Amino acid sequence: MSLTPFQNRFLSRQALGIGLVGWLLPLGLFGLGGCLAKGADQQAAVSLRQLAQERGLLWGTAVQDGQLADQNFSKLLKAQAGLIVPENSLKWDQLQPEHGKFDFSKADGLLDFANNNKMRMRGHVLVWHQQLPAWLGSLNKQDLAMAMQQHINTVVSHYRGKLQSWDVLNEIIAEDGNGLRKSIWLDNLGPQYIDQALLAAHKADPNVPLVINDYGLEGDDPKTARKRATLLSLLKDLRSRGIPLQAVGMQAHLAATPTGPTFNTLPDFLHKLAALNLDVYITELDVNDSQLAAGISGRDKRVADIYEDFLSVVTKDPNVKLVATWGLSDRFSWLNQAFPRSDHLPQRPLPFDMQEQIKPATKSIIKVLSNQK
């Protein structure tokens, strides 16, 4: 989708914490269990985690450590997710705010939660152009290269053998799709930083799948076509030189309009990734409804239709191994700050609403996961 520099990953995508949008709607008294007594809504008793597993997929969501203290949300998370992704706790400014001083406490807590509830956890993210500590900007090129190597080695080694995969590189394709994104890494280390990051991660944990993760790869517009072409060229080059890489992450931050987005060209792109022997992960799925009219029923239907359209395409491809939404409950969606609606109503972009209840999007997901086995 098209993002302004301000909106691009929303001020380093410091996502919402507990209660940040909770004032918009009172917290419901019932989580998933409350839905069981709602007649037609008994579908909520079905676990997305279980339905996906039956199709050979991991179903998961991004979470922040503070959200686990909310009992209703935690109950929903345990029932619905087989995978969690730390929304911020593994980003550089959280892990190494001071040079050489690492703090794994928050991410370790999320991993403990995952292990205690028979979930997997993804690593997100090692090298990105945002959420970097200020001290990196004071380093010369040689020291910056050493700092990147040290960070990757320390972090990946800390979680060796414990994670489902690692987003090694995040959002490295230029916003307009033409070439690589300008960043502290590209500007100082050149394009070889991509090789260096992947090789360092592989050395620290030879068995964990390594991922290049990016957004704007899903639709049918010209900018998407350019981003795909640039990424495919990079991937072919990496493959030809034996650089370790196992998967491509498609963020899938989808922007709803009354008639779009559409995904007619997506199967061909997925086929080209499969031809490179790369798995595909859907890593940050949500549906931005800020461009839709205010009525909840109309918004919910359009968002649900987009979930169904998108998931109907990607779940047919055997190389798609996991789907993770960027949040599970609307209460904790980053979109309410990154893309606030002009009418000041909260967005409804995720599988469950602010009270952890099902809505049309939930039913669309259940429909796709149930019917296309």
Image (cartoon, helix red, strand yellow):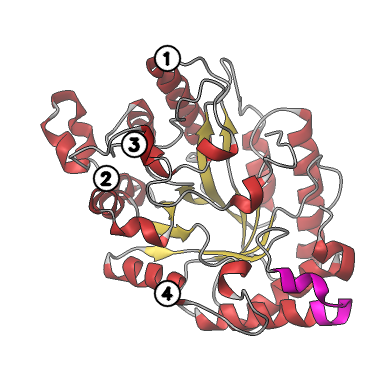
| Residue at x-position 59% and y-position 39% | 338
Whichever of labels 3 and 4 marks the residue nearer the N terminus, that label is 4
Instruction: Name the quadrant of the N terminus.
Output: top right
Label 3: few (<14), some (14–19) or many (≥20) C-alpha neighbours in 10 Å: many
Number of the front mark, 2 or 1: 1
Q: Amino acid at mark 4?
A: Asp
Kind of residue indicated by mark 1: Gly
**SS state under label 1:** loop
Q: How many marks?
A: 4
Please tell me whether residue 135 belongs to the stretch shown in magenta: yes
The answer to whether the residue labelled 1 contacts the one labelled 3, judged by CB atoms less than 8 Å apart, is: no
Judge from the rendering whether residue 273 lies leftward or rightward of residue 342; answer left or right: right
Asked if the residue at tag 1 contacts the one at tag 2, i.e. Cβ–Cβ closer than 8 Å, the answer is: no
**Disc 1: CA contacts within 10 A as few (<14), some (14-19) or many (>=20):** few
Separation (CA) of disc 3 from disc 4: 27 Å
The residue tagged 2 is: 47
Q: In the rendering, at what x and y percent does residue 261 appear?
A: 61, 25
In the rendered view, would you say 366 is above or below 264?
below
Which label number is shown at residue 108? 4
* Residue on which disc 3 sits: 354
Distance CA(mark 4)–CA(mark 2): 26 Å
Q: Earlier in the sequence, mark 1 or mark 3?
A: 1
Q: Of residues 70 and 316, which is closer to you in this image?
A: 70
Reading the image, the residue beneath label 1 is 295
Instruction: Say if mark 4 contacts mark 2, CB within 8 Å.
Output: no
**Lateral position of residue 358 relative to residue 38, left or right:** right
Q: Amino acid at mark 3?
A: Met
Q: Closer to the camera: disc 3 or disc 2?
A: 3
Q: Residue at the location (24% across, 48% down)?
A: 72
Magenta part of the chain:
134-144
The prevailing secondary structure element of the residues shown in magenta is helix
